Image (cartoon, rainbow, N blue to C red):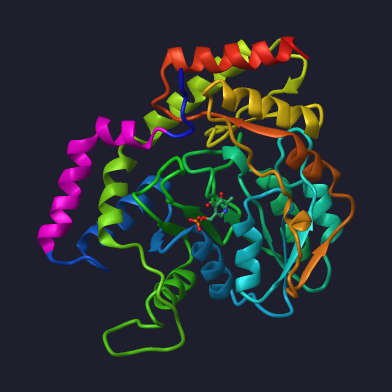
Amino acid sequence: MKVSFYGHVRQYQNIKEEIDNNIKEVLMSGSYVMGPMLSKFEKQAAEYFGCKHAIGVGNGTDALWLSLMALDIGPGDEVITNANTFFATAEAIWIAGATTVLVDCDPQTKNIDPAKVEAAVTDKTKAIMPVHLYGQCADMPALAEIAKKHNLMMIEDNAQGIDGHGDTFKQGEFSSTVCTSYIIQKNLGCFGDGGMVFTDCDGVNAKIRKLRNHGSPARNVHSFGFNSRLDDIQAGVLSAKMNHITAWTDQRIGWAETYSKGLKDARNFSLPYTKPGYRHVFHLYVVETANEAKRESLLSFLNDAGVDAKTHYSIAIHQQEGFPWGKDARTVGSLANAEQNAATCVSLPMYPELTQEEADYVIAKCLEWDSAQ
Ligand SMILES: Cc1ncc(COP(=O)(O)O)c(C=O)c1O
């Protein structure tokens, strides 16, 4: 049996008519960039998210650095983020010209540890960029207290966390912008690259709209800017898919419960932790083995058995070769939890369209490996 890591084609087949209709509508409109489908999707996304503005951009990385630029964060400024995140989080800070400051994660949730953030604040710190890693919100209320105390802005990296919320808070409640990625493998993914910035701030909205479109607020009028737009075909795909995101998240949570129940007695790897009251959207279901050698052993055992398990992310940012490539960067304190996570993580197949048979097979193979240790 083979269990793939993603279910993109199954998802497309399930809602093919809705997606095809939107794509056809764009094709027949003759308007493919900054057209009516983008406006429609931006309105739909803002309503869904419960914020004033949703701005479609080229990808999730651009959403992050466009936010930094719109907030006037650049050279000489420090931005604090996770050492254990996808590379793009740190990269966006460098693209904006600022200094990336990496701190450790909480050992249970793997999200940024607020105590470590506080210890990293200097008079150059301008912002905190928490990542809702694997789909569970970072501890935003604790981070908000630190931000308030030191007069810092917050920019949420929500590439993995769309449709999630905390126990008492929603995404965006404490931050200037929430940035998401719509790359195909995300929980809400288009057929290529895409991204979005959510904000309640009219000024930030106006700045990002200009920056994404050659600094242009109106035809023939320009100031410094870029080209980073979400094109209308992708907006049409996302508009169709957005109607299903809540149900898809519920299915992901269901598969996570199935895995956690089936694997609860495993002795050689630990299971993901969900904080009470949080809506963890399980972009990834990540287990951790006791050490790196066992991780390689579990990964190859699963791969050999036809289970497409992967690692997210097996090299922490500060451990990448050549770090920081002449860019401005600081690490603060021990990054032991992030390093341990990088060395031991294994992501099991996780998508709404999994079948019971596939989930049972993944569990059986994990247990078979476990009992052979
Ligand atoms: C945590 C995180 N941040 C940022 C990004 C960047 O998004 P994109 O690939 O759309 O640029 C991704 C995913 O790709 C991500 O997982």
Image coordinates of residue 271 in percent, x first then y, are: 69, 23
Q: Which is the main secondary structure of the residues drawn in magenta? A: helix
Say if 354 sits above or below 195 in the image: above
Asked where in the image residue 226 lies, by quadrant, the reply is bottom left
Extreme residue in the front direction:
304
Specify whether residue 291 is painted magenta.
no
Q: Nearer the viewer, residue 279 or 86?
A: 86
Report the residue at 69% width, 80% height from top: 75
Asked where in the image residue 299 lies, by quadrant, the reply is top right
Seen in the image, is 14 located left or right of residue 184?
left
Image coordinates of residue 285 in percent, x first then y, are: 59, 30
Q: Nearer the viewer, residue 358 or 139?
A: 358
Report the residue at 48% width, 66% height from top: 201
Seen in the image, is 228 located left or right of residue 42?
right
Say if 227 sits above or below 242 in the image: below
Q: Which residues are magenta?
A: 7-29
Image coordinates of residue 117 in percent, x first then y, are: 79, 54
Determine if residue 274 is in view: no
Determine if residue 262 is in view: yes
Asked where in the image residue 53 lies, by quadrant, the reply is bottom left
Q: Quadrant of the C terminus?
A: top right
